[in-house]
Image (spheres, rainbow, N blue to C red):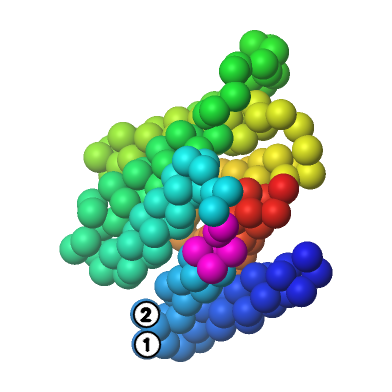
Amino acid sequence: MTQSALTLFLPAALFAVGAIVARKYRNEWYFWTKPLPVAWILVWFFLHLDQRAGSESAWILTGLVLGLIGDILLLWKRSFLPGFVAFIGGHVAYVVAFAHSAWSLPLQFALLAFVPAAIYLVLAVPRLRKRSALPVVVSYMIFENAMFLFALNRDWDIGVFFASLGAFLFCLSDGFWGWNRFVRELENPGLFILGTYYPAQALIAWGVIYF
């Protein structure tokens, strides 16, 4: 298991550092480096599937593929809408993957999980540079929180912890992305957005495969 963890996280981390540095200093390399971490996570996940893999793994694989497509499409402004749709599709795939257990989370806990999203919207919406961005921001918040809640709702074990942590980091990443794109540019957006996004994908893949 330790060796498998190294083969997932070490290359993904190296590719991630390359993408973050390229975004900050050498933008011409960013187009080549941005997709590499998720591409590696996708390959690793596929190679570690076995005959016992069920529908959950298939949906996670679908989410990774759509995430990779979204990574590539969002490199160009003109393909923003297809990239956005790809990421929403990836979130839906993760929700379906996690939604196999009967609902067991207390209602109070589920509502509490939406409080950070509500605070984010209260802060972000009045500051949006374009009002047309409102549906995008709200959609991301809804699907991200749904993914996080369904990840938490599964029968608890260490794998659920990793997958839930990944879902939480995904929420942070999309929050940073939305703020940077639609509200105000962050000083080092790659560090905040990609620095949470790549670990999110890796942790979800790891949690589903090994636990």
Q: Quadrant for residue 75, please give it.
A: bottom left
Pointer 1 local density, CA inside 10 Å: few below 14, some 14–19, many at least 20? few
Secondary structure beneath label 1: helix
| Residue bounds of the magenta highlight | 45-50
Which residue is the site of mark 2?
A: 31
Q: Is residue 124 visible?
A: no
The residue lying furthest to the left in this view is 78
> Residue 167 occupies which quadrant of the picture?
top right
Residue visible at 78% across and 38% down in the picture:
157
Q: Amino acid at mark 1?
A: Glu
Amino acid type, residue under disc 2 in the picture: Phe
Residue that badge 1 annotates: 28
Judge whether residue 100 can be spotted in this image.
yes
The residue located at (69%, 13%) in the rendering is: 106
The residue nearer to you, when weighing 56 against 153, is 56
Q: Which residue occupies 63% across, 54% down?
A: 209
In this rendered view, identify the residue nearer to me: 95 or 157.
157
Q: Are marks 2 and 1 in contact (CB under 8 Å)?
A: yes
Outermost residue to the front: 51
Pinpoint residue 32: horizontal percent, then vertical percent.
39, 83
Q: Is residue 14 above or below residue 38?
A: below
